[in-house]
């Protein structure tokens, strides 16, 4: 895997992109790696379409990897603000020397930033998809509206992106 495009993902963005039928954006932009705990979180309801889509992705482009530093995971979980998936994603990102971590969780993003990691969110994925001409401006705006209107993801950064996207050609 190319370290310049290696991204470790948390469960939230995978689920959100799968629900919106845009999980396929990720392998067009990055090499995606997830820890086992994240995969388990995405499969909690394994008969749902998003879980099925994520499980299919592990057969081709979505790599699942075991975290080695279990004591660091336990330490991160101890404060109870991070779940096992977020903690494993942060530790795996460090272990693999990944380019960035992809998360929708504000506290996980802050904690990863404290470790000096580059943090990406879904707005970054949509913006990069548009900039790389994977999504036309109209498709990007439609996806943003889907996230907000269907309550898949309604955050300030998505609302800010919606404003930014109004000027995209």
Image: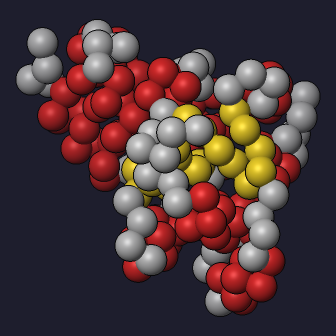
Which percent across, then down, holds residue 165? 19, 27
Q: Name which residue lies at 75% across and 76% down.
A: 69
Asked whether residue 38 appears in the rendered view, the answer is: no
Asked if residue 16 lies left or right of residue 46, the reply is left
Asked if residue 44 lies left or right of residue 30, the reply is right
Asked whether residue 45 appears in the rendered view, the answer is: yes
Which percent across, then down, holds residue 160? 22, 44
Q: Quadrant of residue 31?
A: top right
Q: How is the image coloured?
A: secondary structure
Residue 41 sits above or below residue 18 on the image = below
Which percent across, then down, holds residue 119? 40, 57
Q: Name which residue lies at 35% across and 24% down.
A: 129
Q: Quadrant of the C terminus?
A: top left
Residue 6 sits above or below residue 106 on the image = above
Which residue lies most toward the left here? 167
Which percent across, then down, holds residue 79? 65, 89
Q: Quadrant of the N terminus?
A: top right
Nearer the observer, 157 or 116: 116
Nearer the observer, 82 or 67: 67
Q: Name which residue lies at 74% across and 54% down.
A: 35
Asked if residue 95 lies left or right of residue 73, the reply is left
Q: How many marks?
A: 0
Which residue lies most toward the front here? 2
Q: Quadrant of residue 143?
A: top left
Asked if residue 163 lies left or right of residue 112, the reply is left
């Amino acid at each position: 895997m190319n370290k310049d495009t290696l991204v470790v993902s948390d469960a939230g963005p995978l689920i959100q992109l799968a629900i919106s039928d845009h999980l396929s954006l990720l392998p067009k932009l990055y090499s995606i790696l997830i820890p086992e705990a994240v995969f388990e979180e995405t499969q909690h309801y394994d008969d749902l379409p998003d879980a099925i889509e994520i499980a299919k992705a592990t057969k081709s482009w979505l790599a699942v990897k075991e975290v080695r530093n279990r004591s660091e995971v336990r330490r991160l979980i101890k404060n109870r603000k991070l779940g096992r998936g977020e903690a494993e994603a942060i530790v795996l990102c460090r272990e693999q020397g990944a380019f960035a971590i992809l998360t929708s969780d504000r506290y996980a993003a802050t904690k990863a930033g404290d470790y000096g990691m580059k943090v990406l969110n879904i707005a970054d994925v949509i913006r990069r998809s548009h900039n790389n001409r994977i999504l036309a401006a109209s498709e990007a705006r439609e996806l943003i509206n889907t996230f907000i209107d269907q309550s898949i993801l309604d955050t300030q950064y998505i609302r800010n992106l919606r404003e930014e996207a109004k000027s995209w050609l």
